[in-house]
Image: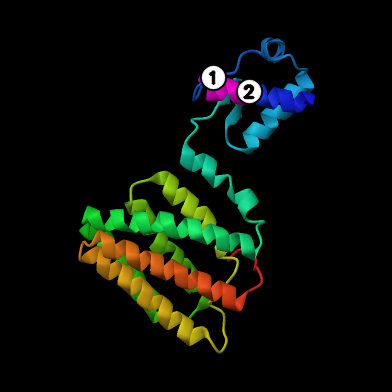
């Protein structure tokens, strides 16, 4: 095992076992090197790797600490890698999103929250009235993020957001012969989701969300758009 890999494995074990728990300060570098049996350079490289994943953080003048190990925060770091995934991989991730978001939508319906229903209604009214491709993307993301947030699980919200972020690079709402048909079908899908939430029907909400995301998968498979840069 390479020295850096050994240092990384040792730090991971210390954190996973609770020897270094959330927000714990690292021991002094010489002590940690002796404990792991590695050099300072190997330890520092391992620390940089874990910092990039959001697992640890360095505080100027204070030292190195384990992060809060918040699942949502760590998952958000996945976007750095997920944004490199090609279309076939995005389609696999959409299956994951479909499962998670269906569950979150059912939870949102079960909450019976009038404020959420009003907010979703406002977003959907604006979404149905626009034909601007960029505005559609933003409003679509706002609609789905509001539902996932209402589901009450920040980890689900973060993971679906990361998947949606990469999926948003493969744009189906572009001017062309299919734009109107796609827009109308998408609007109906969103409306079915909102209707199920406002009637407080979790099963119907989950079904509507699953069908809507499955339709997006079908469009992506059929159109196979090339990835675009982030929205302005």
- Quarter of the picture containing the N terminus is top right
x then y, percent, for residue 165: 54, 59
- Mark 2 secondary-structure assignment: helix
The residue to which callout 1 is attached is: 20
The stretch drawn in magenta includes residue 16 = yes
- Earlier-in-chain disc, 2 versus 1: 2
Q: Is residue 28 left or right of residue 16?
A: right
User: Which residue is found at the position 61% from the left and 26% from the top?
Assistant: 12
Mark number, residue 135:
none
Which of the 4 image quarters holds residue 227?
A: bottom right
The residue to which callout 2 is attached is: 11
191 lies above or below 164: below
Q: How many labels does the image show?
A: 2
Q: How crowded is mark 2: few (under 14 residues within 10 Å), some or many (20 or more)?
A: many
x then y, percent, for residue 171: 57, 72
Specify how the rendered protein is coloured. rainbow
x then y, percent, for residue 231: 58, 66
Q: Which of 231 and 36 is in front in this view?
A: 36
Q: Is the magenta stretch mostly helix, strand or loop?
A: helix
| Circles 2, 1 touching at the beta carbon (< 8 Å) | yes
Q: Can residue 118 be seen in this view?
A: no
Q: Which of 42 and 92 is in front in this view?
A: 92
User: Which residue is found at the position 23% from the left and 55% from the top?
Assistant: 110
Question: How far, Cα to Cα, is label 2 from label 1?
Answer: 9 Å
- Mark 1 secondary-structure assignment: loop
121 lies above or below 85: below
The stretch drawn in magenta includes residue 90 = no
Q: Give the range drawn in magenta.
A: 12-19
């Amino acid at each position: 095992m390479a020295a850096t890999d050994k240092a990384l494995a040792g730090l991971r074990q210390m954190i996973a076992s609770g020897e270094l728990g959330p927000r714990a300060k690292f021991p002094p570098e010489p002590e940690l090197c002796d404990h792991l049996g590695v050099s300072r350079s190997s330890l520092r490289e391992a620390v940089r790797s874990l910092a990039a994943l959001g697992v640890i953080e360095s505080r100027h003048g204070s030292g190195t600490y384990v992060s809060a190990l918040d699942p949502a925060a760590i998952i958000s770091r996945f976007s750095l890698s997920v944004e490199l995934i090609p279309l076939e991989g995005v389609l696999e991730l959409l299956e994951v999103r479909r499962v998670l978001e269906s569950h979150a939508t059912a939870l949102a319906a079960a909450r019976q929250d009038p404020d959420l229903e009003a907010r979703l209604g406002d977003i959907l009214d604006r979404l149905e009235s626009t034909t601007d491709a960029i505005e559609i993307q933003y409003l679509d993301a706002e609609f789905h993020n509001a539902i996932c947030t209402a589901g009450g699980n920040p980890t689900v919200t973060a993971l679906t957001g990361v998947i949606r972020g990469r999926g948003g690079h493969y744009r189906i709402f572009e001017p062309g012969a299919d734009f109107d048909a796609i827009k109308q079908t998408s609007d109906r899908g969103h409306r079915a989701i909102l209707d199920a939430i406002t009637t407080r029907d979790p099963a119907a909400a989950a079904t509507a969300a699953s069908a809507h995301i499955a339709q997006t998968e079908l469009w992506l498979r059929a159109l196979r758009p090339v990835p675009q840069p982030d929205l302005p």
